[in-house]
Image (cartoon, grey):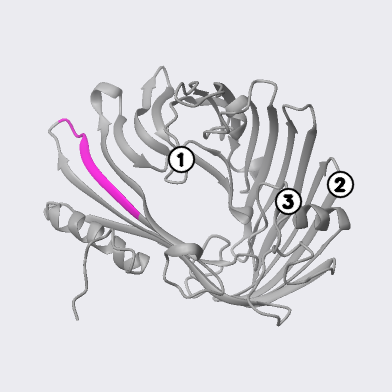
C-alpha cells in the first residue's frame, strides 16, 4: 500500500499532513544552532450527566467561558524555533513555525474535516536584538503577536496576531515602540483586510507598575461593497507584587468603533462607526504560599449596535489551587456570566472541582496537571431561549444534551501540559 506524503491530501489525518512541513523545516535548518522545541497540549474525555459526550457551558453573548472542566476538544500547539545566524553586532536571525491541532470531543481524533482542523498558525522569520533598533526586532510572516489573555477563561481580550510584517520594541527615550502591518488575522479570516497596529510600552508609573498604549486602525477594504474603516484603542497597566503580596494585577480599558469593535484584531467591516464597544478588564494572579495560588477576573463589556440596540456582558470568576502535598492539588473554579440584551438578561453560573496530580510541583502555574473533574452549571430561561435561537444543540439550548432543563453537569479526566 502506498501512502501519499502530499500535505494537501485530504485523506490524511491532520497531524500527518502537517508533519512534512515540520520535517522539511528541521532538515533545512543549520545544525550549528540549538533547535528550540516548545508546545502546549490538553487532552481528555468527558461525559454530560452520563448521556453521551461532554457538552460545554458558554452563555450566548459572552466572549469566553470558564475553562476548568469545561473544555470539549483535544488541542495542541507544537512549535519549533531555530536561530539561523548570529551576526557580529549581536543580532540574531531566526525562523519559527508552529502546528496547531484541534478536534472536538466525541469524534475520532483525525484533526481534520467537519470536527477538527490542523494548520500552521505560525510561520515567520525574525531579526532580533538589532543595534540600529536599540535592541528591537524586524519580523515578517504569520505569527502570534502581542497576545494578552486571561488564563482561567482563555479570553484573549487584546490580540494583534496576524500575517504581516513589523518593527517590534524599538527603544527610544526609555519607551518601546512597535508597528505592525497585517492583512489577515488567521486562516479563518476570509478576506484580505489591511490593519495597522501601533504600540508604545514602558511607561513606568510606580515601582513594579508599567503602562502600555495600543492603537489599531483598519483600512476600508475597497474590494468589499458597503465596507467601512474602523479603529480601536487600548490602555493597559500591569502591576507586579501588589502591596508587597507577591500578587500580579492587570487592568485594561478598551474602546473600538466600526470594524475596530474587535478591539485589537479585525472586526466586521460591514459595521459603520455607529457600532461601538467599550471594555474593562481586571484580573489578579497570586501564589500566596508555595501551595496556595489562583487567579481572579472581572470583565465588563458594553456593545452598541448599528440599529441602536445594546448588549452588556459581565463576567466575574476565579480559580484557586491548594496543594495537600508536593504533587497533589485540589482545584476549584467558580464563574458567573451575565448578558443584558433584548429579550431578557441571560445568566449562567458554573462550578468545577478537580482533584489533580501535579508531578512537577504544587504551584498554580506548574504543569503537567492530570485532573479528574466534576462541573455543575445552572442558567435561566433567557439564556436557554438565546442558546436555542443562536446556538441550537449547545449545552444551554433546549435541543442540547440537557434538553429543557436549566441545569446540567459534566465529569471527566484531562491532562494539560506546556513546556
The residue under the point 50% across, 65% down is 115
Q: Is residue 39 above or below residue 44?
A: above
Name the secondary structure under disc 2.
strand
Identify the mark nearer the N-term, 1 or 3: 3
Residue 357 visible in image = no
Residue at horizontal 54 percent and vertical 32 percent from the top: 264
* Picture quarter with the C terminus: bottom left
Q: Residues within 10 Å of mark 2 (few under 14, many from 20)?
A: some
> In this figure, which residue is indicated by the disc labeled 1?
190
Local secondary structure at mark 3: loop
Main SS type for the magenta part?
strand
Mark-to-mark CA distance, 3 and 2: 11 Å
- Identify the mark at residue 345; answer none if there is no mark: 2
Tell whether position 144 is magenta: no
**Span colored in magenta:** 89-98
Q: Position of residue 64 (x, y in %)?
A: 65, 50
Q: Position of residue 133 (x, y in %)?
A: 29, 23
- The single residue placed furthest to the top in the displayed view is 173
User: What is the quadrant of the N terminus in the image?
Assistant: bottom left
Left of 396 or right of it: where is 152? left
What's the distance in space between the residues labelled 1 and 3, CA to CA? 24 Å
- Return the residue at label 3: 60
Amino acid at each position: 500500500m502506498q501512502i501519499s506524503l502530499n500535505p494537501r491530501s485530504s485523506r490524511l489525518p491532520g497531524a500527518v499532513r502537517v508533519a512534512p512541513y515540520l520535517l522539511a523545516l528541521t532538515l533545512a535548518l543549520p545544525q550549528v544552532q540549538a533547535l528550540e522545541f516548545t508546545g502546549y497540549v490538553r487532552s481528555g474525555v468527558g461525559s454530560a450527566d452520563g448521556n453521551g459526550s461532554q457538552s460545554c457551558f458558554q452563555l450566548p453573548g459572552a466572549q469566553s467561558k470558564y475553562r476548568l472542566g469545561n473544555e470539549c476538544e483535544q488541542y495542541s500547539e507544537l512549535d519549533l524555533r531555530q536561530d539561523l545566524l548570529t551576526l557580529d553586532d549581536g543580532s540574531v536571525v531566526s525562523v519559527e513555525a508552529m502546528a496547531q491541532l484541534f478536534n472536538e470531543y466525541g469524534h475520532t481524533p483525525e484533526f481534520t474535516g467537519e470536527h477538527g482542523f490542523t494548520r500552521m498558525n505560525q510561520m515567520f522569520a525574525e531579526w532580533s536584538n538589532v543595534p540600529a533598533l536599540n535592541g528591537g526586532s524586524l519580523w515578517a510572516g504569520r505569527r502570534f503577536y502581542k497576545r494578552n489573555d486571561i488564563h482561567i477563561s482563555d479570553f484573549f481580550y487584546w490580540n494583534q496576531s496576524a500575517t504581516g510584517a513589523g518593527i517590534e520594541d524599538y527603544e527610544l527615550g526609555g519607551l518601546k515602540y512597535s508597528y505592525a502591518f497585517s492583512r489577515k488575522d488567521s486562516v479563518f479570516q476570509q478576506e484580505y483586510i489591511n490593519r495597522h497596529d501601533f504600540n508604545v510600552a514602558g511607561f513606568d508609573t510606580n515601582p513594579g507598575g508599567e503602562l502600555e498604549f495600543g492603537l489599531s486602525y483598519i483600512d476600508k477594504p475597497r474590494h468589499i461593497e458597503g465596507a467601512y474603516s474602523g479603529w480601536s484603542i487600548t490602555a493597559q497597566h500591569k502591576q507586579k507584587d501588589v502591596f508587597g503580596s507577591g500578587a500580579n494585577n492587570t487592568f485594561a480599558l478598551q474602546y473600538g468603533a466600526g470594524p475596530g469593535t474587535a478591539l485589537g484584531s479585525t472586526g466586521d467591516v460591514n459595521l459603520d462607526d455607529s457600532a461601538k464597544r467599550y471594555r474593562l478588564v481586571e484580573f489578579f494572579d497570586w501564589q500566596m504560599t508555595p501551595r496556595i495560588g489562583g487567579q481572579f477576573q472581572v470583565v465588563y463589556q458594553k456593545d452598541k449596535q448599528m440599529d441602536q440596540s445594546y448588549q452588556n456582558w459581565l463576567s466575574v470568576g476565579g480559580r484557586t489551587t491548594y496543594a495537600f502535598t508536593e504533587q497533589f492539588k485540589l482545584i476549584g473554579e467558580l464563574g458567573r456570566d451575565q448578558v443584558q440584551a433584548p429579550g431578557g438578561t441571560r445568566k449562567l453560573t458554573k462550578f468545577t472541582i478537580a482533584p489533580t496530580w501535579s508531578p512537577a510541583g504544587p504551584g498554580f502555574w506548574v504543569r503537567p496537571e492530570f485532573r479528574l473533574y466534576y462541573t455543575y452549571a445552572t442558567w435561566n430561561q433567557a439564556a436557554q431561549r438565546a442558546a436555542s435561537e443562536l446556538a441550537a444543540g449547545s449545552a444551554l439550548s433546549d435541543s442540547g444534551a440537557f434538553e429543557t432543563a436549566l441545569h446540567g453537569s459534566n465529569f471527566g479526566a484531562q491532562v494539560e501540559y506546556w513546556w
